[in-house]
Amino acid sequence: MCSRNPSGSMRAQHRSCSELREGPYGQVAGRHYDLVMSTTPAQFQPTRPVPMAGAWSAGRSVGATLLVALLGLAIIGLNTVIAYLTVAWPAVPIATGVVLCLGFSMAVYLLHRANWLAILSMVWALIILVGSVQLAPEAVLETRGVRQEVTITDVEVNGKRHAFNLQGSNGPLDEQLIYQGSSPSYRVGDRLAVLVDPDGVVELENADSVDSTGKLGMLVYGGIGWTLIALLAGWRGHVRRRKGRYAVSI
């Protein structure tokens, strides 16, 4: 060690310390001292965790999750409006509904970075599709439809399409009761009540099967399901990005 010389000058003290470091033992000690002083701060310096490539911040994940959830609700509302505007052409909301539901499933897939939630969303999509397509015509029949008691007089079968001829109190009806399927519950001679649109825009339906409130409930039920799926996809996707799983840059 360098001893302090109270009576000596600073230059003399510096020279004595230099001589001690340059000695056969002091040289090793001096080098070791320099090595420790140069490496110790780097060795014990705290390291910050390096984020995985493609990881999102919490705020970005929350924003994307809310965007997907709102997208699902917007799709439900949009296809329902389309069904009202094209109530005479039910094939239109069916086509747009399929495309929009597939779009929501793709958004869930990109948010989650996995397949199973996107596939699960298609179950709710089927409920939403049925509700949005059938709500408009059934609401029209409940609003302005005329209830009539009729009797089935005949049936025309073309594949799985069954067209039943109806006889009302004032004579045969111009419209037929259409059933798509292989096993209709109607038989010739059956009596039932039907709702007929006086404007002829919506096809007549069995009065017992018209339930616009039930179709609205399907939309609410489907909207809740899609919202829960979006929230779960956002949470799982955030975790998967932080872990670097299924690294896709989106």
Image (spheres, grey):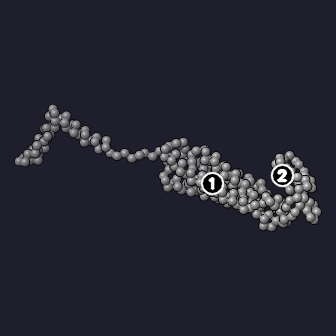
Q: How would you rate the neighbour count of disc 1 (Cα within 10 Å): few for under 14, some for 14-19, many for 20 or more?
A: some
Above or below, 237 relative to 170: above
Residue at 61 percent of width and 45 percent of height: 116
Q: Is residue 219 left or right of residue 141?
A: left
Q: Quadrant of residue 28?
A: top left
Q: Quadrant of residue 219?
A: bottom right
181 on left or right of 242:
right
Q: Quadrant of the N terminus?
A: top left
Q: Which disc number belongs to residue 128?
A: none
Rendered residue at 76%/55% (across/down):
92
| Residue at figure coordinates x 53%, y 51% from the top left | 235
- Residue 164 % position (x, y): 88, 54
Q: How many numbered marks appear?
A: 2
The circle drawn on residue 185 is: 2
Residue type at the position of mark 1:
Gly
Coordinates of residue 181 in the picture (x, y in percent): 82, 48
Disc 2 to disc 1, C-alpha distance: 32 Å
Going by the picture, which residue comes out furthest to the bottom?
144
The relative height of residue 110 versus residue 149 in the rendered view (above or below) is: above
Q: Nearer the viewer, residue 242 or 187?
A: 187
Observer-side mark, 2 or 1, equals: 2
Determine if residue 53 is in view. Answer: no
| Residue 225 circle label | 1
Task: Compare residues 30 and 60 and report the one nearer the observer.
Answer: 60
